Image (tube, rainbow, N blue to C red):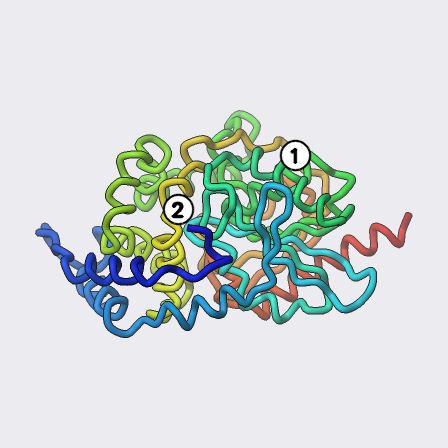
Amino acid sequence: MSLPTERVPDSALEDLADRLDRTRAPRLTGETGWARGTDADALAALLDHWRHRFDWRAHEARILDLPWEESAALRVVHQRSIQPGAPTVVLLHGWPDSVLRYERVLPLLRDLNVVVPALPGFPFATEGRGMDAAAMAALVGDALASLGYERYVLSGGDVGGDVAEQLAALHPERVGALHLTNVSPLHAVFADRSTLDAEALTYVDAAARWSRAEGAYIAVQSSKPHTLAVGLSDSPAGLAAWLFEMLHGWSDEPFAADDLLLWISAYWFTNSIGSSFATYAEAAKPVPYVSTPTVLSLFAADTKPAPVSFAARFVNVQEVVAHERGGHFAAWERPDAYTQDVRKAVALAESRIASR
């Protein structure tokens, strides 16, 4: 299926409806709230909404209307500025989302050139093979070169943050500044404890505790992704349960049902959940240090927020912006605040040019 250049066929919508009608609810042990995974009652309501009230066609029309382009090995959303010589910003999404993470940011950046790559293995990508962040970074760099961009600012978090660090290390002459909502979580995994101060050790231990309590998805997606992919690719209820848990737990405020289902449907109709696991199963070792000037946004409800002193070990932090609201999907949850921080990174890049 070649989304987003064509509509989902009616047969795919009919198949989804049939599968939802035949959902078999599991037998559960103990309490059925969020403590042991996705809340059973919340999931039942979401599946009912998906079957009877969610209008995919309305959302699809909006997705198809985005300024898509094919570039090198990637498909990108490419919003060109009407201002000649405008700076360029590259928005890099994470997991479990897609280019849709930035749908609310795009209208706020019309004065800039904005490129949002559909990363390989994720919804809407032309490249269906998943790959690690270093390989993705190389493809993003090639795509930007084919679009004619020799210099740009990179913005992202989660997988997108990993790709940004890798690309800045690969092409430091092209990346004017970084805007990150987190440094790569792999820095905590690979950190040499003998070199860490007390604050960094406290953070690394806290991140490890979070992974033990909340990171079961990391363990299975990195070790047995093919087993998991079978169930999630075949059952819309299973896919919804898996993604709903993350979207609920990592955001500052509840997603509206239609927003949840838009992101879940993107994975369902593109059959990309299995390939999206590649960044976990084939994780690239993080770059030791990135000297590119960096604006670090800290959103209060994000997962495993690293202290600034730890982040500064790995990226050249020039400015820190702390936000009292917003979670892991800040570009969707707080687009105005996110956009303001992107502009800080653009200003940082422009000041570097002016000082030469």
- The residue sitting at 20% across, 57% down in the picture is 19
Percent x, y of residue 317? 68, 47
- The residue sitting at 30% across, 55% down in the picture is 245
The answer for how far apart the CA atoms under marks 2 and 1 are is 32 Å
Q: Residues within 10 Å of mark 2 (few under 14, many from 20)?
A: many
Residue wearing tag 1: 289
Residue wearing tag 2: 272
Closest to the observer: 304 or 52? Answer: 52
Closest to the observer: 130 or 162? Answer: 130
- The residue sitting at 15% across, 57% down in the picture is 23
- The residue sitting at 73% across, 56% down in the picture is 88
Residue 296 visible in rendering: no
What secondary structure is marked by label 2? Answer: loop
Precedes in sequence: disc 2 or disc 1: 2
Residue 96 horizontal side relative to residue 45, left or right: right
Q: Is residue 230 above or below residue 327?
A: above
Q: Residues within 10 Å of mark 1 (few under 14, many from 20)?
A: some
Percent x, y of residue 231? 24, 43
